[in-house]
Amino acid sequence: MVTPAGVAHAEDEVPVPPNTGLTDTGQGPVSDADKDFVIKVRLAGLWEIPAGNIVAEGSDNPTVVNIGKSIAAQHVALDNLDRAVAKKLGIMLPNEPNDDQKGWISEMENAATPTQLDQIFIDRLRAAHGKIFPAIGTIRASTRNDSVRLLAQQANQFVMTHMTLLESSGIVDYSGLPTAPAPAAPAGQGPVPIDNQMLAAASQGTGQPGLSNTVILLVLAAALVVGVITTMRIFRAR
């Protein structure tokens, strides 16, 4: 018998992934998705480090200032880990942010007020972390390379920390975040067949669960035609 799950309590400890079981030897094939992931980790640092420094210097909100400093410093550490993996696996990394990231940095640099700077910083970084979060999970679960697997594990911890730090500001615009895609229908449980839809539409307005009067008359007419044709064939045969 399955034991039902207990009620969660505030004092319950949340498990922290152990450091055992993960190696960093560079062993295992490296897929295109693995390479793309290592490059994206590098790109994240290339714009989030300056973004954190900008808000640390330009914000009037002590909480946001500390968030900016923490994220910038932690991305320096993550960038060091990422570049070590790239060197081990022979992956070429970019040395500057992409065009979108440069635009976000420019937004922060040109913010009209410290309050506007805070909002841009928090919302841009929270949205970016939300996008890379599922990508990390995919690589962590699927990669065949042990160094990439370890990097994904480490990146996941950084991203979770940064998302929580950003949310601690209290000014995240959750309504502006992308929504999750609708779940796919399970096998064998797709859309309602067209015949059923037609029957359902036909029954509306009659107050009855069955067919409408129009549908019934059409069926009777078709049966009458078949009957007449059959009778004519019988007489001809005689």
Image: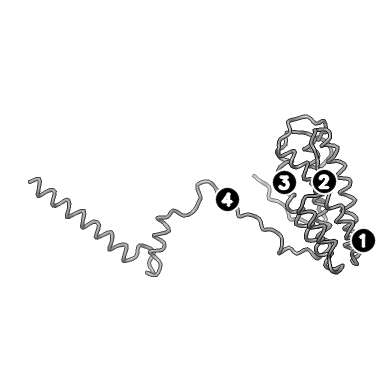
Cα separation, mark 1 vs mark 4, equals: 46 Å
Q: Position of residue 86 (x, y in %)?
A: 82, 37
Cα separation, mark 1 vs mark 2, equals: 33 Å
Amino acid on which the number 4 mark rests in the picture: Ala
First in sequence: mark 1 vs mark 3: 1
Amino acid on which the number 3 mark rests in the picture: Ala
* Helix, strand or loop status at disc 1: helix
First in sequence: mark 1 vs mark 2: 2
Q: Nearer the viewer, residue 175 or 20?
A: 175
Amino acid on which the number 1 mark rests in the picture: Glu
Q: Do the residues labelled 1 and 2 touch (CB within 8 Å)?
A: no
* Helix, strand or loop status at disc 3: helix
Identify residue for label 3.
135
Amino acid on which the number 2 mark rests in the picture: Val
Q: Nearer the viewer, mark 2 or mark 3?
A: 3
Identify residue for label 2.
16
